[in-house]
Image: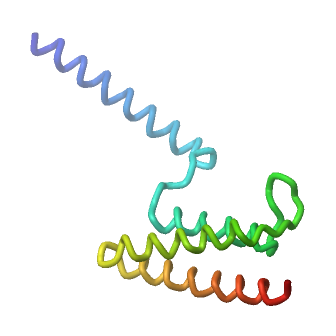
Amino acid sequence: MEEMKKNVDETWKESVAKEKDALKENKESLPPEATFSFFISTLALQVSIYLGRIPNPATNKKEKNLPQAKFIIDTLDMLKEKTKNNLTNDESKLLENLLYELKMQYVAINKGN
């Protein structure tokens, strides 16, 4: 019985090692790690698309949608309030800086219309 258990353990270890090697090889094809910073950065990128500052990846054209940009900025503001005192210093600073930059861009673009 002990010999069978040892064999199973060794097989499992080999399987895990193979999976780790495969992950290392395919690291480029893996999605990024889901973090709060990545999430809010993704939202900020969407705002930049809706403000017409960068091309929409689906159409490869710069398009403005100010109501949608404002909605996402408001969503980031809501996240700031709901996560108050629950973020790391880096996350908090990132959110604060993103909001400031996006709001300034929104106001500048909205004045031009």
Instruction: Classify residue 65 as left or right of residue 34.
Output: right
Q: Nearer the viewer, residue 62 or 16?
A: 62
The x and y percentages for residue 79 are 45, 70
Residue lying furthest left in this view? 2
Q: Nearer the viewer, residue 88 or 113?
A: 113
Tell me which corner region of the image, top left, top right, bottom left or bottom right, holds residue 91.
bottom left
Residue lying furthest right in this view? 61
Tell me which corner region of the image, top left, top right, bottom left or bottom right, holds residue 107.
bottom right
Instruction: Classify residue 90 as left or right of residue 42.
Output: left
Residue for point 83% across, 65% down = 55
* Colour scheme employed for the rendering of this structure: rainbow
Relative to 82, residue 108 above or below: below
Relative to 110, residue 71 above or below: above
The x and y percentages for residue 105 are 71, 85
The x and y percentages for residue 45 are 67, 68
The x and y percentages for residue 22 are 52, 36
Q: Nearer the viewer, residue 3 or 90?
A: 90
Relative to 80, residue 39 above or below: above
Residue for point 59% across, 42% down = 26
Relative to 85, residue 27 above or below: above
Q: Which quadrant does the C terminus fall into?
A: bottom right
Q: Nearer the viewer, residue 1 or 84?
A: 84
Residue for point 75% across, 72% down = 66
Instruction: Classify residue 30 as left or right of residue 50.
Output: left
Q: Which quadrant does the N terminus fall into?
A: top left
